[in-house]
Amino acid sequence: MLAKERFPDDCFLLAYRDWRSPNSTAISISPMTNIYYETITQLEQQNTSKNYVAGWVSGFLGNPQIEEQRLTEDWEAGYEDGKARHTENAEKWQNK
Protein backbone atom coordinates (compact mmCIF):
# COMPACT_ATOMS: atom_id res chain seq x y z
CA MET A 1 0.00 0.00 0.00
CA LEU A 2 1.30 3.44 -0.88
CA ALA A 3 1.62 6.10 1.78
CA LYS A 4 -0.63 9.09 1.16
CA GLU A 5 1.15 12.41 1.00
CA ARG A 6 -0.07 15.88 0.14
CA PHE A 7 1.69 17.48 -2.80
CA PRO A 8 1.12 20.98 -4.20
CA ASP A 9 -1.67 21.23 -6.78
CA ASP A 10 0.79 22.19 -9.54
CA CYS A 11 2.75 18.99 -8.98
CA PHE A 12 2.56 15.78 -11.00
CA LEU A 13 3.65 12.40 -9.71
CA LEU A 14 6.13 10.26 -11.54
CA ALA A 15 5.69 6.58 -10.74
CA TYR A 16 8.28 4.06 -11.80
CA ARG A 17 9.61 0.62 -10.96
CA ASP A 18 13.23 0.05 -10.10
CA TRP A 19 14.71 -1.56 -13.24
CA ARG A 20 17.33 -3.34 -11.09
CA SER A 21 14.58 -5.33 -9.39
CA PRO A 22 12.19 -6.39 -12.18
CA ASN A 23 10.31 -8.79 -9.92
CA SER A 24 9.72 -6.18 -7.24
CA THR A 25 6.16 -5.03 -6.64
CA ALA A 26 7.34 -1.75 -5.11
CA ILE A 27 6.63 1.40 -7.09
CA SER A 28 8.52 4.60 -6.36
CA ILE A 29 6.61 7.84 -6.59
CA SER A 30 8.26 11.22 -6.75
CA PRO A 31 6.76 14.67 -7.25
CA MET A 32 7.26 16.26 -10.65
CA THR A 33 6.51 19.93 -11.06
CA ASN A 34 5.10 21.73 -14.09
CA ILE A 35 8.63 22.83 -15.00
CA TYR A 36 9.17 19.61 -16.94
CA TYR A 37 5.98 19.86 -18.99
CA GLU A 38 6.25 23.62 -19.56
CA THR A 39 9.85 23.32 -20.76
CA ILE A 40 9.03 20.52 -23.22
CA THR A 41 6.11 22.53 -24.60
CA GLN A 42 8.30 25.62 -24.95
CA LEU A 43 11.07 23.68 -26.72
CA GLU A 44 8.59 22.11 -29.15
CA GLN A 45 6.96 25.49 -29.90
CA GLN A 46 10.39 26.96 -30.62
CA ASN A 47 10.95 24.16 -33.16
CA THR A 48 13.99 22.89 -31.27
CA SER A 49 15.81 19.82 -32.60
CA LYS A 50 14.11 16.57 -31.57
CA ASN A 51 17.48 15.19 -30.51
CA TYR A 52 18.05 18.18 -28.19
CA VAL A 53 14.59 17.68 -26.65
CA ALA A 54 15.17 13.93 -26.19
CA GLY A 55 18.53 14.64 -24.58
CA TRP A 56 17.02 17.30 -22.32
CA VAL A 57 14.32 14.87 -21.14
CA SER A 58 16.91 12.16 -20.41
CA GLY A 59 19.13 14.58 -18.49
CA PHE A 60 16.22 16.05 -16.53
CA LEU A 61 14.98 12.60 -15.50
CA GLY A 62 18.47 11.37 -14.64
CA ASN A 63 18.56 8.66 -17.30
CA PRO A 64 21.92 7.27 -18.39
CA GLN A 65 23.39 8.51 -21.66
CA ILE A 66 22.48 6.66 -24.85
CA GLU A 67 24.94 4.42 -26.68
CA GLU A 68 28.01 6.14 -28.09
CA GLN A 69 27.14 5.39 -31.72
CA ARG A 70 23.76 7.15 -31.30
CA LEU A 71 25.13 10.30 -29.60
CA THR A 72 24.79 13.56 -31.49
CA GLU A 73 25.98 17.04 -30.55
CA ASP A 74 22.44 18.31 -30.07
CA TRP A 75 21.47 15.31 -27.91
CA GLU A 76 24.53 15.83 -25.68
CA ALA A 77 23.80 19.57 -25.36
CA GLY A 78 20.20 18.79 -24.37
CA TYR A 79 21.34 16.13 -21.90
CA GLU A 80 23.72 18.52 -20.14
CA ASP A 81 21.08 21.28 -20.04
CA GLY A 82 18.47 18.84 -18.69
CA LYS A 83 20.82 17.71 -15.91
CA ALA A 84 21.40 21.38 -15.02
CA ARG A 85 17.64 22.14 -15.25
CA HIS A 86 17.98 24.95 -17.84
CA THR A 87 17.78 25.46 -21.62
CA GLU A 88 20.80 27.68 -22.26
CA ASN A 89 21.87 25.85 -25.44
CA ALA A 90 18.38 25.36 -26.92
CA GLU A 91 18.64 28.39 -29.21
CA LYS A 92 21.62 26.86 -30.99
CA TRP A 93 19.54 23.81 -31.91
CA GLN A 94 16.40 25.45 -33.28
CA ASN A 95 15.41 24.17 -36.71
CA LYS A 96 15.16 27.14 -39.01
Image: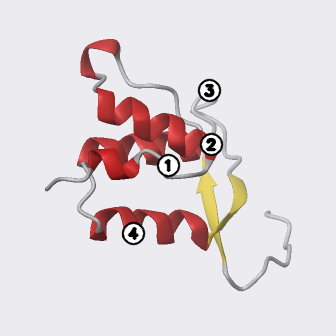
**Comes first in the chain, label 1 or label 3:** 3
Q: Where is residue 57 in the image (x, y as percent from the top left)?
A: 46, 48
On the rendered structure, is 1 left or right of 91? right
Q: What residue type is labelled 1?
A: Glu
Name the front one of labels 2 and 1: 1
Mark 1 vs 3: CB contact within 8 A: no
Q: Which residue is drawn at 51% across and 27% down?
A: 64
Q: What secondary structure is marked by label 1? A: loop
Q: What secondary structure is marked by label 3? A: loop
Q: Which amino acid does label 3 sit on?
A: Arg
What whole-number distance in Å separates the C-alpha atoms at marks 3 and 4?
33 Å
What whole-number distance in Å separates the C-alpha atoms at marks 1 and 3?
33 Å
Q: Residue at x 47, y 36 (%)?
A: 79
Name the front one of labels 3 and 4: 4
Q: Which amino acid does label 4 sit on?
A: Gln
Q: What residue type is labelled 2?
A: Ala
**Comes first in the chain, label 2 or label 4:** 4
Name the front one of labels 2 and 3: 2
| Label 3 environment density (alpha carbons within 10 Å; few <14, some 14–19, many ≥20) | few
Q: Name the residue under label 4.
A: 42
**Comes first in the chain, label 3 or label 4:** 3
Q: Name the residue under label 3.
A: 20
Q: Mark 1 points at which residue?
A: 88
Residue 73: assigned label: none
What whole-number distance in Å separates the C-alpha atoms at marks 2 and 4?
17 Å
